[in-house]
């Protein structure tokens, strides 16, 4: 379908071509998707809060331990691209159940890891689950509720992200100090089991409506509106994760916080992210792109404050909380942005978004690790600000002829 059609429909999510209209909303199924994303994001973010004890237990450097984030992101990029293609004609509920199963297996393996190799295998499995889930979540929401309720359903699903950002980092750090990092991953596996039970009970039959192929992905990349979303995310998210992956070393080394205070600061980050999600959803009602740009500019400002005055406890604590709020605005904005940019190929477009997101996470973690090992944690925070600023400027300076989103 042409880019003209995409541009003509991006202004209103109530007008989406090719969407299967549903008379009654399946809110229980939407809630099970929110629970699924909560479990996956919780597992994805755990290394950031447990990085130091993981590295010490396995006898590796902080930079090497941070590459568990890279492994998850790399495989997640491929899974986001190819899950809709590989699963072909399968009922979409079977696919979602399988992806949740990977969360359970991954967390269990991580809890039993006897070295970096086993931990990396666990994180690779998680990457498949995360990439596959995000490539389909938006498209499935479009089939679970009437089209007029799609924005509400998307916001509800991303509430799972918000709750995960509130709980994963601070509670992970606290429980890691209390019962050990392995037990924290075991709890993550239990969350996966609860999620799978909920999804088995609520997600209805959803036969495939036609699988995308490689040609579909190439056609989407030919749309300037889609390319703008992807490039913006590559810059912003690379910067964010370069900093966030190593936020614990920063808090330990610069303001020199205790583990208890680090848990409190990370809790503030999570609470900020929770409210940032709702702020982003409110901005999305007017412009999805604006939600991403505002969040990125706020991250850049926070990184500047932390690199300049991070030795101060109040500035570090408030800055990290503000950072959480800023990042919380981005996920709901970017997912809505990509659907509005390609409403006729929502599943394939979401796959491209997942790939870009995971490539950004991987590159950010790799580059951040190099900066931490050679320049200290402030190097990663500085790159965080640069990447976020460049992404925001790219979106802001795009020609006005782009689809208004």
Image (cartoon, rainbow, N blue to C red):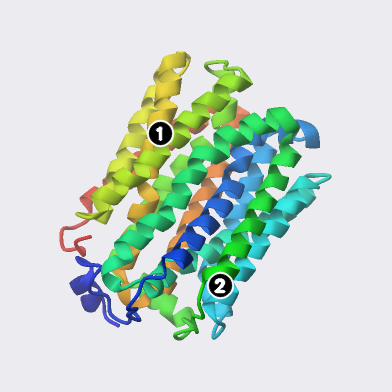
Looking at the image, do the residues carrying marks 1 and 2 touch, with CB atoms under 8 Å apart? no
Q: Residue at x 53, y 64 (%)?
A: 133
The residue under label 2 is 83
Residue 62: name its quadrant.
top right
Q: Residue at x 63, y 57 (%)?
A: 194
State which quarter of the image contains the N terminus: bottom left
Is 173 in front, or is 393? Answer: 173
Dot 1: few (<14), some (14–19), or many (≥20) neighbours within 10 Å? many
Would residue 49 be found to the left or right of residue 61 on screen? left
Q: Earlier in the sequence, mark 1 or mark 2?
A: 2
State whether residue 296 is above or below residue 90: above
| Residue 103 on image: x %, y % | 65, 58
Would residue 310 be found to the left or right of residue 4 on screen? right
State which quarter of the image contains the C terminus: bottom left
Q: Residue 365: which numbered mark, if any?
A: none
The residue under label 1 is 323
Helix, strand or loop at mark 2: helix
């Amino acid at each position: 379908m042409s880019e003209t059609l995409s541009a003509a429909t991006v202004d209103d999510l109530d007008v989406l071509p090719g969407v299967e209209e549903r008379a009654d909303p399946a809110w229980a199924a939407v809630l099970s998707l929110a629970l699924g994303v909560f479990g996956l994001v919780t597992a994805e973010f755990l290394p950031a809060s447990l990085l130091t004890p993981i590295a010490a237990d396995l006898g590796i450097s902080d930079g090497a331990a941070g590459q568990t984030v890279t492994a998850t992101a790399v495989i997640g990029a491929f899974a986001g691209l190819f899950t809709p293609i590989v699963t072909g004609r399968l009922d979409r509920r079977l696919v979602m159940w399988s992806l949740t199963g990977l969360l359970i297996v991954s967390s269990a393996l991580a809890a039993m890891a006897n070295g970096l190799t086993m931990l990396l295998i666990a994180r690779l499995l998680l990457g498949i689950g995360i990439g596959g889930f995000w490539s389909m979540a938006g498209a499935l929401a479009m089939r679970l509720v009437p089209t007029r309720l799609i924005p509400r359903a998307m916001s509800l699903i991303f509430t799972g992200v918000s709750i995960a950002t509130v709980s994963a980092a601070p509670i992970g750090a606290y429980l890691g100090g209390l019962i050990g990092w392995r037990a924290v991953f075991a709890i993550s596996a239990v969350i996966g089991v609860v999620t799978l039970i909920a999804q088995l009970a609520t997600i209805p039959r959803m036969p495939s409506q036609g699988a995308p192929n490689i040609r579909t992905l190439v056609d989407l990349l030919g749309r300037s509106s889609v390319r703008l979303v992807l490039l913006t995310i590559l810059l912003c998210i690379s910067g964010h994760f370069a900093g966030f992956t190593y936020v614990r070393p920063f808090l330990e080394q610069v303001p020199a916080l205790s583990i208890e205070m680090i848990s409190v600061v990370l809790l503030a980050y999570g609470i900020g992210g929770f409210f940032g999600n709702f702020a982003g959803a409110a901005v999305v009602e007017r412009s999805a792109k604006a939600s991403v740009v505002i969040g990125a500019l706020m991250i850049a400002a926070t990184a500047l404050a932390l690199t300049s005055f991070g030795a101060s406890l109040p500035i570090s604590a408030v800055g990290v909380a503000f950072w959480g709020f800023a990042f919380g605005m981005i996920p709901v904005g970017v997912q809505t942005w990509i659907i509005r940019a390609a409403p006729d190929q929502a599943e394939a477009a979401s796959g491209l978004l997942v790939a870009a997101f995971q490539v950004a996470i991987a590159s950010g973690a790799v580059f951040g690790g190099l900066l931490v090992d050679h320049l200290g944690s402030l190097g990663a925070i500085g790159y965080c600000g640069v990447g976020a600023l460049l992404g925001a400027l790219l979106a802001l300076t795009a020609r006005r002829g782009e689809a208004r989103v």
